[in-house]
């Protein structure tokens, strides 16, 4: 066993989305920044989550290569395309790296990578930027893999910003890589979470809290923001505030404005607008 693992986070910055569905007062929409985490031993490393476009993922691959480590494993925390569409690009540089996820997350992955969803959702928003080969993970049977004698444990979280999310717990360094169950100073994607889903997300945060991590890495984070466990509480507060204000307002605009008044500085209010419109369909 190597003495101690090290970890680093690469944040793929915001990129423009081709759409005319803009937040009030906005002139463009961008995708939220995406976190990819590299956990390294003396020789080998594991990568948690990729990004969306070929260009983004080439930068992630360059970053991994620059460490001099041998990438053995790529793990996806959940099935959203923005966290696994880059696997083909990474595997071109590390062809022996295996790609794994929990079986339930793979079910979501298959939908996201289906021709229907790629053609209707991903390609129109990122024309000419999506890899033509979208790799689906192998089932991480038993929910555990190892790196230089250290256990990496996949913790099922249920529903967070989508169904069948997980976090990857590395007990030897008190690290939790939380995927989109955790946000770090970025507006939350609540468009897939009704009232019950928001309760489930709070329960997922309780599960992460029970791990008592020293560091908790969010799937979407402001570049440079610390990976502190207090983001668990902050994410929960955001969900509770959204839940409360959703029950007190009639329109998407009212919900958006009141949440923005509480969280004026979080990255990417466009996501808040989309969440508000989902909760208040048909309103303005």
Image (cartoon, rainbow, N blue to C red):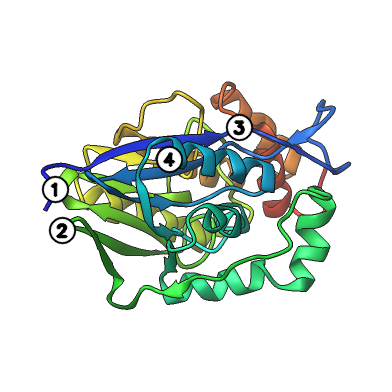
Q: Residue at x 68, y 42 (%)?
A: 55
Residue found farthest to the right? 20
Quarter of the rendering containing residue 67: top left
- Whether tag 1 and tag 2 are in contact, CB under 8 A, the answer is yes
Marks 2 and 4 sit apart, C-alpha to C-alpha, by: 33 Å
Q: Is residue 243 above or below residue 140?
A: above
- Whether tag 2 and tag 3 are in contact, CB under 8 A, the answer is no
Could you tell which of marks 2 and 3 lies nearer the N-terminus?
3
Q: Nearer the viewer, residue 186 or 173?
A: 173
> Which residue carries the number 4 mark?
235
Q: Residue at x 56, y 71 (%)?
A: 136
Q: Residue at x 85, y 44 (%)?
A: 19
- Whether tag 2 and tag 4 are in contact, CB under 8 A, the answer is no
> Which residue carries the number 2 mark?
149
Neighbour class for label 3 at 10 Å: few (<14), some, many (≥20)?
some
Image x and y of residue 192, in percent: 61, 59
Q: Is residue 251 above or below residue 149?
A: above
> Which residue carries the number 3 mark?
13
Q: Secondary structure at mark 2?
A: loop
Could you tell which of marks 1 and 2 lies nearer the N-terminus?
1
Image x and y of residue 205, in percent: 35, 51
Which is closer to the viewer, label 1 or label 4?
1
Image x and y of residue 12, in percent: 57, 36
Could you tell which of marks 4 and 3 lies nearer the N-terminus?
3
Q: Secondary structure at mark 4?
A: helix
Which is closer to the viewer, label 2 or label 4?
2
> Which residue carries the number 1 mark?
2
Quadrant of image for the C terminus: top right
Relative placement, left or right, of 271 versus 174 is right
């Amino acid at each position: 066993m190597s003495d101690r693992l090290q970890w680093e986070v690469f944040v793929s910055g915001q990129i423009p989305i081709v759409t005319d569905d803009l937040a009030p007062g906005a002139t463009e929409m961008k995708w939220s920044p995406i976190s990819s985490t590299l956990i390294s031993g003396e020789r080998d490393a594991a990568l948690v989550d990729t990004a969306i476009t070929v260009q983004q993922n080439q930068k992630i691959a360059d970053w991994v290569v620059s460490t001099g480590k041998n990438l053995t494993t790529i793990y996806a925390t959940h099935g959203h395309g923005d966290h696994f569409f880059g696997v083909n690009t990474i595997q071109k540089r590390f062809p022996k790296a295996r790609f794994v996820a929990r079986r339930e997350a793979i079910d979501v992955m298959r939908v996201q990578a289906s021709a229907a969803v790629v053609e209707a959702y991903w390609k129109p928003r990122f024309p000419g930027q999506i890899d033509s080969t979208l790799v689906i993970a192998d089932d991480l049977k038993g929910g555990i893999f190892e790196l230089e004698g250290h256990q990496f444990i996949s913790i099922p979280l249920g529903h967070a910003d989508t169904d069948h999310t997980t976090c990857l717990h590395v007990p030897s360094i008190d690290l939790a890589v939380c995927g989109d169950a955790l946000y770090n100073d970025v507006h939350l994607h609540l468009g897939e979470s009704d009232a019950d889903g928001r309760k489930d997300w709070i329960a997922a945060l309780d599960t992460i809290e029970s791990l008592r991590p020293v560091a908790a890495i969010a799937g979407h984070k402001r570049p440079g923001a610390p990976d502190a466990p207090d983001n668990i509480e902050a994410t929960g507060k955001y969900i509770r505030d959204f839940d409360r204000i959703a029950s007190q307002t009639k329109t998407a605009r009212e919900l958006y404005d009141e949440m923005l008044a509480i969280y004026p500085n979080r990255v990417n209010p466009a996501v808040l607008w989309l969440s508000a419109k989902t909760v208040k369909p048909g309103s303005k």
